[in-house]
Structure formats: structure tokens, C-alpha cells
Amino acid sequence: MSEENVQELKERGNACVKEGKFEEAVLHYTHALSIEPGNFSLHSNRSLAFLRMRHFFLALQDADETVKLNPTWAKGYFRRAEVQFATFHFAEALQSYRQALLLQPDDASIAGAIARTTHECHKDKKADDQIPWLGAGIGIILGVIIVIADQIATAKPSLSHPILMVLTTMGVAMVGYALARGFRHYVKCQRKALLEPPPDLSARPHPEDEGEDEEVPEGKTHTPRYSKAQARQRFKKGKSS
């Protein structure tokens, strides 16, 4: 196919993106890339389509390929930053946006994206600092409630000594702090998972794992696959026979 066909496929993909038909757009861009694999603009456009579909790993792959093919094109870094921002990787997005601004310093949209990302980055760091102490504060309140309930609701309070009351309150506060830190860690792990590759659904298990008979090519003998434990057992049987 000619270059005109590649351009036509690209325009079809662009039209599909405008209409919200992102899956169809990906098909057009992928078809065009099969003809012209080194077209960085097509990778950039397909990255946007994948981003709209929330296929973040694939979107980042195309954005990285765009930068690799043309490291002097600001839109490649901008596209990468958009994926990083959408997956809450604000520090990485800020770095990518700044690289785009270096190549295109007069672009107001890039400057605006940097301001927005800087704000979100500060908010995220603030949450990392404040949420664990918020958990500790909630723990102190719960600890005080436990102490008061022990004094009022029981005939013989088990937390009668002041030091024991303080230790109980501090203990509950520490639990609250640890839980809040664990929650922030969980959030960070979830964000990392957004950019992990999808599972390889095309990988077919070994026939023996499925309980099926493996087809043996003509002229070759079938060699069964054993685990290490099975191999040792068969070896022992062979020695004793």
C-alpha cells in the first residue's frame, strides 16, 4: 500500500477518536503501523486512543515508542505525561511535561499541564504526610472511648491505673497510624498496577497440566515432563528394580 493509504488510515483513526470510537481508531492506527512501523505520529495517536480506553500500559508503550522514534518531538513527551498523570504518577508526569516544554517553550497548554500536575503532586505528598497522623488521631479518640467505657460500663474497671490508661490509648493510636500508612502503601501499589502489562491470555498451558494428550510430531518420540520430585521417585524405582 502507498503512503496515501497510510495517511487515509490515520485520518480515519482521527475521525473515530473524535467520535469516541476508540476501539475502531486503534484498528486503523494499527493497520497503518503495519505498513509504516516507524511512523511516530501514528504511535502518538494510538497512545491517545488507548488512554481513552483506559488501557494504560499499552498507551504508555506507544508514548515511549513515540519518544524513541523522535526524541525531539514535544508531543511524544506530552503524550507520555498524559498517561502518567492519568495513573497518578505525578512526579513522573511532571518530568515528562517539563521535557515537552523544553522542546516547545511557548506552548501554553504544556505550561498549564505543568501547573496542574505540580498542584496534584503537592497534594499527594501532603496526603502521604497527613493521613498516617490522621489515623493516629482517630486512634487516640478510640482509645479514650475505650478507657471511658471501661470506667463507666464495668463494675471493676480493668484499666484503673492511669499509666495503663495512657498505654492503652497510645497503643490504639499506634494501630491507627500503622493502618493509615498501610492504606497509603496500598494506594501506591494500586497505582503501580495500572501500568503493569495485562496477563498473557494467549499463553496455553502444557497439555499434561490440562489433562490432555499432547500431539507428538511425526518422526519424534514423546518425552513426558516430570517435576523434580517425580524424577527422583522414578530414579529410586529404577535403582531398586
Image: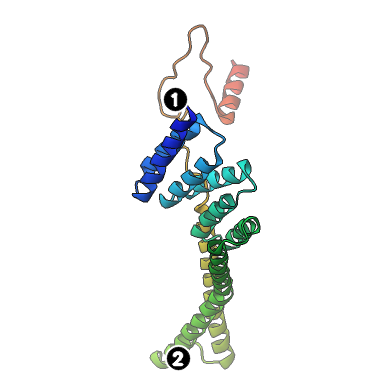
Specify the label residue 207 is tagged with.
1
- In the depicted structure, whether residue 56 falls above or below residue 186: above
Please indicate, yes or no, whether residue 203 appears anywhere in the rendered image: no
Task: Residue type at mark 2: give it.
Answer: Ile
Relative horizontal placement of residue 135, taking residue 149 as reference (left or right): right
| Sequence-wise first label, 1 or 2 | 2
Q: How packed is label 1: few (under 14 Cα within 10 Å), some, or many (20 or more)? A: few
Q: Quadrant of residue 236?
A: top right
Image coordinates of residue 137 in percent, x first then y, are 52, 83
Q: Residue at x 36, y 45 (%)?
A: 16
The circle on residue 148 is 2
Towards the viewer: 92 or 10: 10
Say whether residue 219 is left or right of residue 73.
Answer: left
Q: Judge by depth and name the residue closer to the eye, 9 or 43.
A: 9
Q: Is residue 32 left or right of residue 68?
A: left
Q: Position of residue 223 (x, y in %)?
A: 53, 17
Crowding near the residue tagged with mark 2, few <14, some 14–19, many ≥20 C-alpha atoms within 10 Å? some
Residue 81 point in image, percent of width and height: 56, 56
Image quadrant in which you'd find residue 204: top left
Q: Tell me how far mark 1 sits from mark 2, CA to CA.
A: 64 Å
Under tag 1, what secondary structure? Answer: loop
Is residue 38 shown above or below 109?
above
The picture places residue 14, in percent across and down from the top left corner, at 41, 45
Residue at 56% x, 69% y is 115
